[in-house]
Amino acid sequence: MSELSADSRTTVDGQLVLEPEWVDYLRSQGYSVDAINEAHTVESTSRDISHLVVNISTYDKPQGSASLDLLEDKTELWVCSCEDWQYNQSADVSEDMVKPSDSGRCKHILSVDRVERAKNDENQAELGL
């Protein structure tokens, strides 16, 4: 069995919470995380670990921002616990004008995101409107 690369903590009522480090970083920068919409584990191809990949609901502006529009700024994005996502793909929201949705995608996210899988499936037919 492989080890899971994710941060963990226990809530006051004893529940175990696992999430990629960046989710906690996002909260520390004033952003709210309203929901974890999907969660997957993806085995690493190079080491005996699995990565936690989650799809979260958040906003592109921190809570308390005068320009925060709860409808317009709501966004969903994929977050991974792998080093590539943490160091190369994640948006540094501590910088001016950088939004959570500016984050990129690693190979683990691409492997679980249904939209990306459909784009890469040559047997998928496009719907004509």
Image (tube, rainbow, N blue to C red):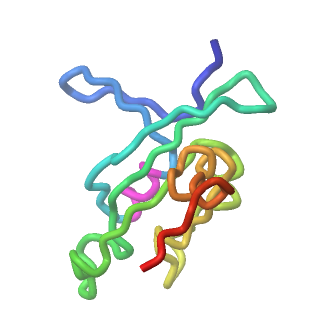
> What residue do we see at 56% from left, 47% from top?
80
Of residues 124 and 93, the one nearer the viewer is 124
- Give the extent of the magenta segment: 23-29
Q: Is residue 107 left or right of residue 61?
A: right
Residue closer to the observer: 12 or 39: 39
Query: Most extreme residue toward the top, as rendered?
Result: 1
The residue sitting at 38% across, 74% down in the picture is: 60
Q: Residue 105: x percent and y percent?
A: 62, 59
Q: Position of residue 34 (x, y in %)?
A: 26, 55
* Position of residue 65 in the picture relative to residue 48 (left or right): left
Residue 25 magenta-drawn? yes
- Using the image, determine if residue 12 lies above or below residue 125: above
Left or right: residue 79 compared with residue 61: right
Above or below, 45 against 34 in this view is above
Residue farthest to the right?
A: 46
User: Within the image, what quadrant is residue 95 found in?
Assistant: bottom right
